[in-house]
Image (cartoon, helix red, strand yellow):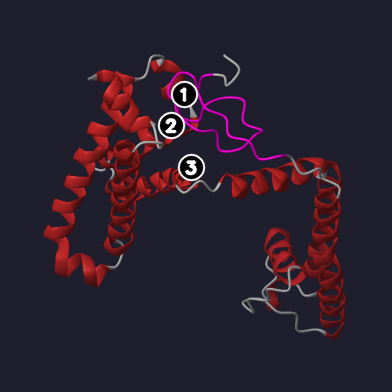
């Protein structure tokens, strides 16, 4: 019985296992939509009792699922400390804590990370491999991006200080941190408009910063694009965990995302 449950809960290569994952994904989507709807006052006031009942229903389902996973896996500690194990735990704890801190219950949307299982269920391993290439490109460009961010920080501090001196509190630049906030909004070309320069010198500096902003936005894009072009593409192969029969999300994975066991063991 334990082995059968293990195949159903952790496996995706059997009809029962795939059906279990599909039903679980439907429950996760339903619960997430419920949380989103509950945040709307008009919906909560009109359907408060129904929302509470459905929330309790999903809580029971997710709690039973988590307990079953703990009872079935051979290495319980590895599962608890694995990525999906932490997600499963964080998905049910907020609801219990909500009895003391009501707003915490909205954190159950963390469980949407479980939707990553769709890649295994639908055999979409190549998409996971493509995302791994993007992560490798980001890691390879880490030093360049860090230098870029530090340079941006210096520019924002310098311009923020100058705007505080030029405009002053009477024009909304009440302190240097507030002026730095304006510099961030301006250099990112967002331009909320809650603070704007009024003096000719301030407008000139603002115009220069906006022009610089357009050029700055292209820098990290070029860095990452260069690293992506030079990232070798690996061959998509399927790894199967020998402990729980779970497929790896990508060839680069070294440990099972469900039980934490090494794919080499």
Residue 88, position in %: x, y?
37, 35
Which stretch is magenta? 235-261
Q: Residue 209, relative to residue 91: is it above or below?
A: below
Return the residue at label 1: 81
Q: In the rendered structure, which disc, 1 or 2, sits on the residue that comes first in sequence?
A: 1
In front: 100, or 136? 136
Asked whether residue 157 is drawn in magenta, I would say: no
Looking at the rendered structure, the secondary structure element under dot 1 is: helix
Q: Residue at x 22, y 46 (%)?
A: 58
Q: Would you say the residues marked 1 and 2 are in contact, meaning their CB atoms lie under 8 Å apart?
A: yes
Q: Which mark is residue 43?
A: none
Q: Main secondary structure of the magenta part?
A: loop
Q: In the rendered structure, which disc, 1 or 3, sits on the residue that comes first in sequence?
A: 1
Return the residue at label 3: 120
Instruction: Work out how far the residue at label 1 is from the one at label 3, CA to CA, in angstroms.
Output: 21 Å
Figure quadrant of residue 136: top right
Q: Residue 219, relative to residue 248: is it above or below?
A: below
Looking at the rendered structure, the secondary structure element under dot 2 is: helix
Return the residue at label 2: 86
Instruction: Work out how far the residue at label 1 is from the one at label 2, CA to CA, in angstroms.
Output: 6 Å
> In which quadrant of the rendered image does the N terminus lie?
top left
In front: 102, or 203? 102
| Residue 120 showing in the rendered view | yes
Q: Residue at x 29, y 67 (%)?
A: 40
Figure quadrant of residue 68: top left
């Amino acid at each position: 019985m334990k082995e059968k449950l293990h195949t159903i809960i952790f496996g995706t290569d059997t009809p029962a296992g795939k059906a279990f994952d599909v039903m679980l994904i439907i429950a996760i989507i339903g619960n997430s939509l419920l949380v989103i709807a509950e945040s709307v006052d008009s919906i909560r006031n009109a359907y408060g009792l129904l929302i509470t009942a459905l929330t309790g229903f999903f809580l029971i389902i997710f709690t039973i699922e988590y307990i079953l996973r703990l009872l079935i896996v051979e290495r319980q500690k590895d599962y608890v400390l694995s990525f999906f194990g932490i997600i499963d735990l964080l998905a049910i704890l907020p609801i219990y804590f909500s009895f003391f801190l009501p707003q915490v219950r909205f954190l159950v949307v963390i469980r949407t990370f479980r939707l990553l299982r769709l890649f295994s269920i639908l055999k979409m391993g190549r998409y996971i491999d493509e995302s791994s290439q993007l992560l490798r490109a980001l890691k390879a460009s880490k030093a360049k991006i860090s230098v870029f961010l530090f340079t941006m920080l210096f520019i924002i501090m310098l311009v923020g200080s100058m705007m505080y001196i030029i405009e002053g509190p009477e024009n909304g630049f009440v302190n240097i941190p507030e002026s730095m906030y304006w510099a961030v909004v301006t250099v990112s070309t967002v331009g909320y408009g809650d603070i704007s320069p009024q003096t000719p010198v301030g407008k000139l500096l603002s115009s220069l910063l906006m022009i610089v902003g357009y050029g700055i936005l292209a820098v990290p894009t070029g860095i990452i694009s260069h690293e992506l072009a030079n990232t070798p593409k690996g061959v998509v192969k399927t790894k199967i965990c020998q402990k729980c029969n779970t497929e790896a999300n990508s060839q680069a994975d070294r440990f099972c995302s469900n039980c934490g066991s090494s794919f080499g063991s």
